[in-house]
Amino acid sequence: MITIPLTITPPIKTAHFHFGVRQKVLLVLLTVLLIALSMSSWLALREEETNLLKEIDQRGLYISRFVAKAMAFSVVGYDYHTIQLLLDELTFSDEIDYARVTNVKGNTMGESGFATLHTNIEPASNENLVMFTNNIQIDNETVGVLYLGLSTSHIMSRLETQRFTLLKREALIILLIALGEFLALSYIIVRPVGKIIDFLKSNIDNKGQLVSKIPMISNDEFGQLAQQFNTLSSQLNKANKKLRSKIESADQQLLETNQQLKQLNEKFRLLSITDPLTGLFNRRYFDRLMEAEVDLSNRRGDPNSILLLDIDFFKAINDTYGHYIGDVVLKNMTTVLRKNLRRTDIVCRIGGEEFAVLCRRANQTQAIKIAEKLRTAIEVTPMTPEIDDSLMITVSIGVASVPCRTKNTTPKQLYKDVDTAMYYSKNNGRNRVTHITDLHQEGTESRENKNSRG
């Protein structure tokens, strides 16, 4: 088995180029200098080219006039040989590349230079020739025409030489100016700014305050800037301390206010779901509780039961003893209920003399036992012992449980069932407990007896 060593190459860190003030100013300076010097060189070359072309025009006119006068007698005398010699002498120079003489009839008497070497190219189409035409006259009478083509090659050569010289000079000037400006910028501007920045980075604490003053770097504007910044930072530090003190005080007040608001909200919440007389939960909380517990029983199948208690002949107590005694009875009955219920049971006052109890995880049998225990305890307990021990009360209780005979019982249906059971207890002797299933069984038995009699 061959083992291949595994080499892990560390990640390469990418260097980030910092385009600072030096680079920005140098770039702008080079761009401006390059544009300015290029424009200056271009204008100078254009001016030089214009002057040279004017010089060619003047020189061409002068030479053509002089040669035309010198050839006048040779043209009249049809001396072709002399004319050709003169034309060859002219084109032998660097300035004249083409020469031709024609008589008044247009016949060529002599030709030398560019056209004789390149018979298939017209002299006028050559960009390096400037053509001049001059009449050959004797006593103001035209006897022929002289055509001269002056060469511009030497002019273009001079212009190219000047252009190259200007470019070298321009590059040198740009380099020297850029170097001087760069050094001046670095020493006069960037260096003090960099020192100020480094000082600020190393002398600011976690609270954002400047712990010491910026040293006086120079006596120029940067020194004044440092002095003004020190004054400003001192004022800002003082203002920052005051602001932090106010913020801390405001935070403390806000925390206290929030705590008070939470307490008030809790009080309001309790008031909204609490009966003020007995301190029990009210009908609003009972409805919410029923909805949650019935939904849980429908989904999981856990048993829950509801007890509905109504004080027998409570109106007679109010009419006989007054509402104050009635309130005492309600409070003392609340005490009896709390003493005889399990810790998981929740009792609510849902009406004037009506109380409801949610018996969590209690099936029909357990709920009936709890209801009987409450009924018995209330029956034997004096309701106004501090006033009159003889005032005794009884209650009629209805009971309903889930799950029941129908699936997915709604809270509304369950309350309707327990209310029906409670009124059955009321209408059948009071001081008793009735489960809603007792009514269903009783109805079934009555229907069976009726059918058997029939």
Image (cartoon, rainbow, N blue to C red):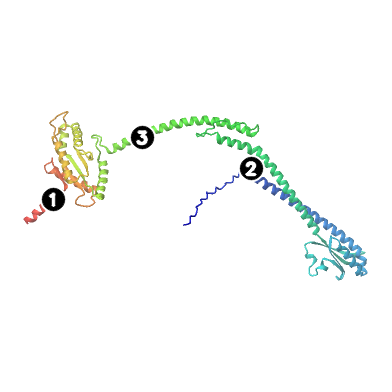
For residue 451, which quarter of the picture? bottom left
Residue that label 3 marks: 261
Q: Is residue 74 visible?
A: yes
Asked if the residues shown at circle 3 and circle 1 are in contact, with their CB atoms under 8 angstroms apart, the answer is no
User: Of label 3 and label 2, which has the lower sequence position?
Assistant: 2
Which residue corresponds to the image point at 65% horizontal and 40% vertical from the top-left? 186
Q: Is residue 140 visible?
A: no
Please tell me how crowded label 1 is: few (under 14), some (14-19), or many (20+) other residues with Cα within 10 Å: few
Judged by depth in the image, the label closer to the viewer, 3 or 2, is 2
- Name the residue type under label 2: Arg
Which residue corresponds to the image point at 12% horizontal and 52% vertical from the top-left? 444
Residue 276 at x, y percent in the picture: 25, 35
- Name the residue type under label 3: Leu
* 182 relative to 327 in the view: left or right: right
Most foreground residue, 351 or 438: 438
Q: At numbered mark 3, what does the secondary structure look like: helix, strand or loop?
A: helix
For residue 285, which quarter of the picture? top left
Vertical arrangement, residue 145 with respect to residue 192, above or below: below
Q: Quadrant of the C terminus?
A: bottom left
User: Of label 1 and label 2, which has the lower sequence position?
Assistant: 2
Vertical arrangement, residue 244 with respect to residue 396, above or below: above
> Could you tell me how far apart the alpha carbons at marks 1 and 2 are, in whole angstroms?
101 Å
Please tell me how crowded label 2 is: few (under 14), some (14-19), or many (20+) other residues with Cα within 10 Å: some
* 356 relative to 99 in the view: left or right: left
Residue that label 2 marks: 22
> Could you tell me how far apart the alpha carbons at marks 3 and 1 are, in whole angstroms?
54 Å
Q: At numbered mark 2, what does the secondary structure look like: helix, strand or loop?
A: helix
* 365 relative to 110 in the view: left or right: left
- Name the residue type under label 1: Gln
Residue 390 at x, y percent in the picture: 12, 31
Residue that label 1 marks: 441
